[in-house]
Image (cartoon, rainbow, N blue to C red):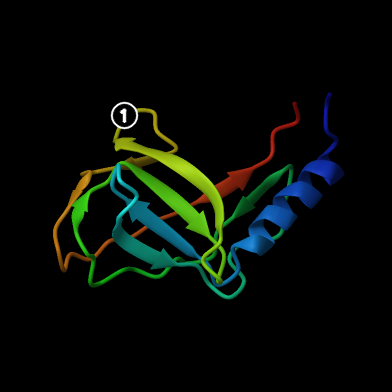
Amino acid sequence: MNLESNARNAAVDALAALLDAGSFEFQTSASSEVATNTFAATAFGAGSSGTATAAAIADDTTATGGTVDHAALKTAAAAAVATLSCTAVGGGGDVEMTSLVIGAGDTVSVSSMTLTVPAS
């Protein structure tokens, strides 16, 4: 199957809408929270060529701390939407981090994020 741009945009916009005022939660291998960053009320701009770019994502200035294994994208009601792999920079994960170890009370930032629905 090969999706046309309008279908890809509709799909990515629907996914993005689930994340409005939701969260980007970094978790340990046991799925315990390490840090949580909050999406804006309108989390992403409109899809273009199947890609939507996140609006500014709020910093977590009081991280719980721990070693990050993965991240969970959640709705504003905390329902899971997607799980992302996390690796150190160059590790090829969905999320690449300068350090997987986050200290209690650290500030955690997400500098940018895109969602993409591929054509095939």
Query: Quarter holding the N terminus?
Result: top right
Residue placed at 40% from the left, 33% from the top? 93
Q: Judge left or right: residue 7 versus residue 110.
A: right
- Which secondary structure, mark 1? loop
Q: Position of residue 84 (x, y in %)?
A: 46, 42
Residue 42 in sight from this viewpoint: yes
Vertical placement of residue 60 versus 112, above or below: below
Q: Residue furthest front?
A: 30
Residue at image point 55% right, 72% down: 21
Q: Where residue 112 appears, x then y in whole percent?
A: 45, 54
70 left or right of 64 in image: right
**Quarter of the image containing the C terminus?**
top right
Look at the image and tell me whether residue 45 can be seen: no
Return the x and y of residue 24 as percentages of the image width and height. 44, 59
Mark 1 belongs to which amino acid? Gly
Question: In the image, 97: left or right of 21?
Answer: left
Q: How many marks?
A: 1
Q: Nearer the viewer, residue 2 or 24?
A: 24
User: Please, is residue 41 above or below residue 57 in the view?
Assistant: below
Q: Residue at x 58, y 75 (%)?
A: 41
Q: Residue furthest bottom?
A: 41
On the rendered structure, is 102 left or right of 18?
A: left
The image position of residue 49, as x and y in percent, is 74, 42
- Residue corresponding to mark 1: 90
Crowd around label 1: few <14 · some 14–19 · many ≥20 (10 Å): few
